[in-house]
Image (cartoon, rainbow, N blue to C red):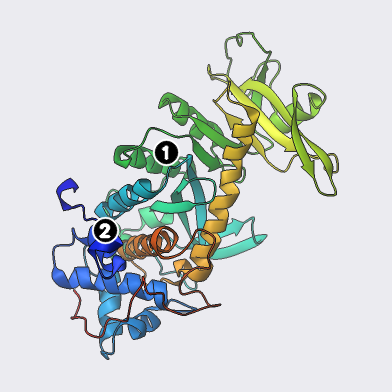
Amino acid sequence: MAEQHLSLSPQLSDDPLTSFAEALFGHLPRADQRRWAHGYLRGLLTTPGKKSVRRLAGAISTSPTASQSLQQFINASPWDWDPAREELTRVAEDRMTPAAWTVTTAVLPKRGAHSCGVHRRFVPQVGRTINCQLGVGVFLSSHGTHLPVDWDLVLPEQWCQDERLRERARIPGSARHRPFWRHVLDLLDALATRTSRAPVPAVVDMSRQPGATQLINGLSRRGRDFVVSVPSSLQVLPVAPGSAPAPAGPAGAGAGVVSVQRLLQRHSTRHLHAAGSHPGQGSARILSARVRVPDGTHTYRLFAQWCPTRRTPARIWMTNLLDERMGRLTALAGLDSGADAAMRRLEEEFGLLDFEGRSYPGWHHHMTLVSAAYSYGRLFAAPADAPALGSAAGSAVTPAVGSAVESLPQAV
């Protein structure tokens, strides 16, 4: 890919979006594919409201067959999304300095049973079971900017056991059922091969997902720094400051095993760090303790912000950054909420929830283009705190996005 890198400097192009699209999608083998990628990207940036294929097509072309061609490009055209995501990572790292790689989830409600990976799932955010797809995304995060650069689609077991379903959804043989924590490790491993930057900590919310221990062990084996939100019920072994842990027994067995919530409650008057004040809540405290997981040999640090008006902490975090300042740890943990806010903007303003296809490649194509549109809007077309391009609140096309495409060829 290195020899295909294109400059994105506005001075070298009358339309920066064209240069951006060429950099990300220049690997596509056919000229019509590259033009439709550019068109879909432009449509996501300029179409207000729902980003259906029909509305995107109407925004970029006057051809009566544009909608069919755009649908075909997204769902049927066999193009590889990995090079585009690799280039998106490079472009993002050229324009920002990530403080962390933040992993979060996207819940995509669906009707019917034919969309790839669709299943019934209890979603804590909405408090009920819904029919949905579950995506896992990794963001390059700094304090103020969160850019999605890679995605995975969680496939329930029924989607891996039924060959008819797999064939209909064009699921490749390499895509199998994996637990959530395995998706996280795979995404972080892939990003580690793409980045040109020094390693940064991974920030992951596992408070509502099974497998927090497996993820922590996997990150430790890789030598990767992390800050992971864990369930309050997670079992740990306390480690006294300055002492080595005793040899581990069977998981969950042995004296001293306790839930992280109970441990922090027990030590609520010890190992405290000032954390400032919250309006109406008085001063919050940061509770901190050193622990290991049963059957583990690594020592970790638990920490949680505890306000006097709450009986339990809102979130409990575990990290292997034992000697890091508490201020930096809480700042890293805070990046998770920024990535969640970016996910909401992707859903509400950039069409993340509007994919109409049913295939596995189509889902990845759409997520790649949505990520590219969002990143372009954040990096090139608007100040960091400006409203998103193409949002329902304001549909004016900025000069950086340019005019609609009047003629695009039939797509394959």
Q: Where is residue 221 in the image (x, y as percent from the top left)?
A: 42, 25
Q: How far across and down, in percent of the image, does residue 144 sit?
A: 54, 51
**Viewer-proximal residue among 160 and 266:** 266
- What residue is disc 1 on? 185
Front-most of residues 190 and 207 = 190
Residue 222 figure quarter: top left
- Whether residue 90 is visible, yes or no, is yes
Dot 2 amino acid type: Leu
Structural distance between the alpha carbons of marks 2 and 1: 25 Å
Dot 2: within a 10 Å radius of its alpha carbon, few (fewer than 14), some, or many (20 or more) residues? Answer: many
Q: Mark 2 points at which residue?
A: 24
Compared with 300, 341 (above or below) is below
Residue for point 41% across, 69% down:
114
Hey, what amino acid is under mark 1?
A: Leu
Ranked by sequence position, the earlier of labels 2 and 1 is: 2
- Whether residue 356 is visible, yes or no, is no
